[in-house]
Image (spheres, rainbow, N blue to C red):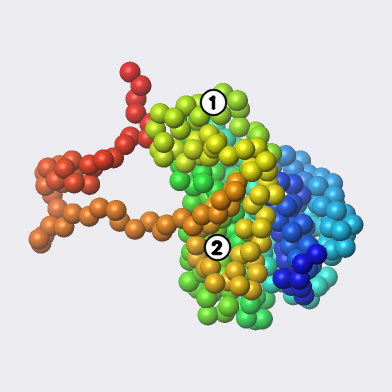
Amino acid sequence: MGQRLEHRVAIVTGAGRGIGRSVAKLLAEEGASVIVNDLGGSVEGASSSVSPADAVVSEIREDGGTAFANYDSVAEFGSAGKIVEMALEEFGRVDILCNAAGILRDRMVFNMSPEEWEAVIRVHLLGSFNVTRQALPYMVDQNYGRVVLFSSISALGSPGQSNYSAAKEGVVGLARSLAVELGDYNISVNAVYPGGSTRMVASIPDSAREWLREQAQKSPGSYPVADLVASPEPEEALVPESNAAKIVYLCTEVGGAINGEVIGTHGWSMSRYFRRFPTKSVYKGEGQWTLEEIGSVAPISLAVGLVNPAPKEE
């Protein structure tokens, strides 16, 4: 058992399975006391069970670590507050927050109901805000905190996941804004693009998986999710545990030097994603652009080299 996080208190939401579970266990191995939060529902967010969180707590305790289970939902502000309250009641502080809780309601947007859209936004984006907002006053008071928000490569665009992609892109904006707000309080906030053989990935239908592989071959880079599904890395590189050390590093004292970034943690690589700076610009001497001017300039400047990610098939 390591000592990098001795005397630190961590909350991990969505910690009953998959990547959240592996992060919670490694945090405990490094000496942190951990609140293992999981509603215990299905991939779609239906039903609930105490079993997943309880199982992880048992594993941590069997390995000599300290952990308590929590079953509250991140989707409601008051309920999220109870997660933080448990950390304070059991350990007296909260130093680390990893927001891994998530659900899927995949559907093409023209078939998606408002309820399916809202359910995913509430868990991923609003849930990230809820728990973070509840924890931050205590981190500010103690002048220390490490926050890791779970985004996804799907934030860059994923067909059939407009709700999920929108939420995950929102998480990136939230992380970068908080990083600027909270740097003076010794609080770092980063987003991660995790990945691996999780329940959520396994829920992708075989037909959709095959389509993504075809897109990765036809147009590499057009669908980042397709490139991930078609990854040449071996199966042992894609287990949920492959993400844990990279995410936990962001939770350490030295990991605080990384702030306001998006870090890819899947497989055997660790990546830092660039912020979105302009790649091409066209300047007019003075005055407003007209449609005629844009129509004559854009095709020979801004549009050069662009590839339609989903051209109409003949």
Q: Which mark is residue 200?
A: none
- Residue at 61%, 27% (x, y): give it: 205
Q: CA distance from mark 1 to mark 2?
A: 32 Å
Q: Nearer the viewer, residue 117 or 249?
A: 249
Between residue 156 and residue 214, name the one nearer to us.
214
Residue at the spot x=66%, y=81% of the render? Answer: 142
Q: Position of residue 94 (x, y in %)?
A: 71, 71
Is the C terminus in the top left, top right, bottom left or bottom right quadrant?
A: top left
Residue picked out by circle 2? 190
Task: Name the residue rendered at 85%, 53% in the picture.
Answer: 59
- State which quarter of the image contains the N terminus: bottom right
Q: Earlier in the sequence, mark 1 or mark 2?
A: 2
- Above or below residue 159? Residue 283 is below
Residue 183's spot in the image, x, y percent? 52, 76
What is the x, y in percent for residue 247? Answer: 63, 59
Question: Quick one: label 1, few (<14), some, or many (20+) residues within 10 Å?
Answer: some
Where on the picture, by quarter, is residue 311?
Answer: top left
Residue 256 appears anywhere in the view: yes
Amino acid identity at mark 2:
Asn
Q: Amino acid at mark 1?
A: Glu
Q: Is residue 82 visible?
A: no
Residue that numbered label 1 is attached to:
210
The residue lying furthest to the right in this view is 62
Between 192 and 127, the one nearer to me in the picture: 192
